[in-house]
Amino acid sequence: MITLSNLDGLKTAMGSRKGQLVLLGLVVVVALVLRCWSFNEVAVASLKVEPDSWEKVKLARKIAFKDKSPKYFKHPRLMLNTSAILLRIGAIFGYKGKKRAARIMVGYMVALSIGTLLVIYYIGLFAFSSRRIALTGAFVFAVLPIGVVSPHYIKEDVPVMFFSNLALLMMILLLQTRNRRYYLWCGLTVGLAIGTKLIALTLLPIAVLTHLVYLRQGRTTRESRLFWQLGAGCALIAVGFFLFNHQLLIHFGEFISETTEQAEYARKGHFDGTIFSPWDYLWTYQLRYGLVPVMTGGIVLASLTGMGWVLYRWRRHLAGVVLLAWVLTLYIIVERSPAKPFPLFVRYAYPIIPGLVCFAAFALIRGAAAVTRFPLGRVWGPLLVAAVLAWPSVHSIVVVAGVTRDTRVRAADWIHDNLSESSTIIIDGKFYCPRLNREYDTRRKRLCKKKRMWSQYDVDYVITNGFNFNRYFVNEKFIPHSKNAADCYRRLFANCRLVKRFLPEYGIQTIGFHNPEIRIFDMNECGTVPIDTDS
């Protein structure tokens, strides 16, 4: 069996343990500073900017202090049950209330994000046997815009990213150390990941692939006979799933029913009608409109380069092949599904982001090493890496600086100061627009959904947002419904006077559920542009 004590290449790559831990500690500090910037305000704001966060806080509080089994079966309950444990611990020390509960749960998301950073470090260390790749991968995730913003939202996406990649780390350790006890850890962590969100079922074929690679590496009959480890590992998948989902043992039928509805949603697409074939965008929609905006183009390009490099030299990087299989399998699944609801549909692909980060780090370090063969290569190599890492770092700093002064907050303040409380206002959609005082006569309607046109409402003002109308502008080329809706918005923009427009200070601050463009139109001053459509 290969162990860390006799794996010379890996031991050399690890270098000084003390220096390694110091650098990793500095990376963790950078990650914490970015994620905890204005933490109190961000935690409370998350209840307003993201539609599901308040629901998750209410459910966790209900589990912690009231009914231990609320009727919620959209997803497995690991996140809710573990959050409830944290809320009970907080209550012991007098830390109660819904805003404090939100802070606890956002803090939990931040902790899992930091845990994902450490997992990325060890995946880079063991999959590619390089301390530099490991530290570079950890730093990339520390400053990655989506890595910084995603913990602000109380959803299952960050926990499933952590647990699914922890399971991948166990698989890589199984291959690199050949210690069969990792079959047990693989089973347990796969179960925990599935118990967080069912998208982690994708880990099952990856686990089978890992086993086949392990057998291919084996040299003795004894090592190939792994019946009891396999059996125990499979049993631990169920243990991991039900460990924090014990309520489902009683309500399993309801859970399956709700899960079936979720599967239908993934198959049929979002209710907004933005449904298209992956062939329309040559299987690059998630890449172009999901990953690049939240990871930056340089990091995504480095990731693709690293994936190609590993595929070309696959015999040297069998652990990297397992990681590559995971990234490609989940990408194909989420890309094939028509369910891509704006503004943050990339969250369905969160679990592959650590893998992409590892491939990016691999390409950057190997690329920098290759450049050193040329004149002045020792200068240009590090500069190349620094240039690629600089943009996501700046991007994240700019993003967190604008989080606490969201465009919706600014728009609401302006409306309260400038519009009469007797005004009647149509707010475009249930989410993503400013929240106004109850004194205003407001109605929430989807302005351009089917035949419910904005022109049909006798009101003073209409408020719309970029998260709603941009989804149709992006998809109108291939979807007739999106084309009709986009034309509807264009007629609104051309026909009615724009009273006020709110944009973030910098365009890149529109990320995730933060800082949508807000437009306020005066419906008493509309022109004569034709408004009839065939939608």
Image (spheres, rainbow, N blue to C red):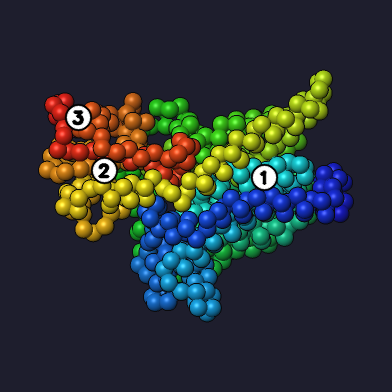
Determine whether the residue tagged by mark 1 lies in a helix, strand or loop: helix
Q: Amino acid at mark 1?
A: Phe
Q: Amino acid at mark 2?
A: Ile
Q: Residue at x 36, y 58 (%)?
A: 258
> Is 376 above or below relative to 157?
above
In-front residue for pair 243/457 = 457
Residue 382 in sight from this viewpoint: yes
Q: Earlier in the sequence, mark 1 or mark 2?
A: 1
Q: Amino acid at mark 3?
A: Asn
Q: Nearer the viewer, mark 1 or mark 2?
A: 2
Q: Nearer the viewer, mark 3 or mark 1?
A: 3
Which image quarter: residue 527?
A: top left
In-front residue for pair 138/12 = 138
In-front residue for pair 31/345 = 31
The residue that label 3 is drawn on is 495
Q: Residue at x 79, y 50 (%)?
A: 20
Q: Give percent across and percent down for residue 468.
A: 32, 40
Neighbourhood count class around disc 2 (C-alpha, 10 Å): few under 14, some 14–19, many 20 upward: many
Q: Give percent across and percent down for residue 333.
A: 47, 41
The reply to whether callout 1 and callout 2 are in contact (CB within 8 Å) is no
Q: Residue at x 37, y 50 (%)?
A: 409
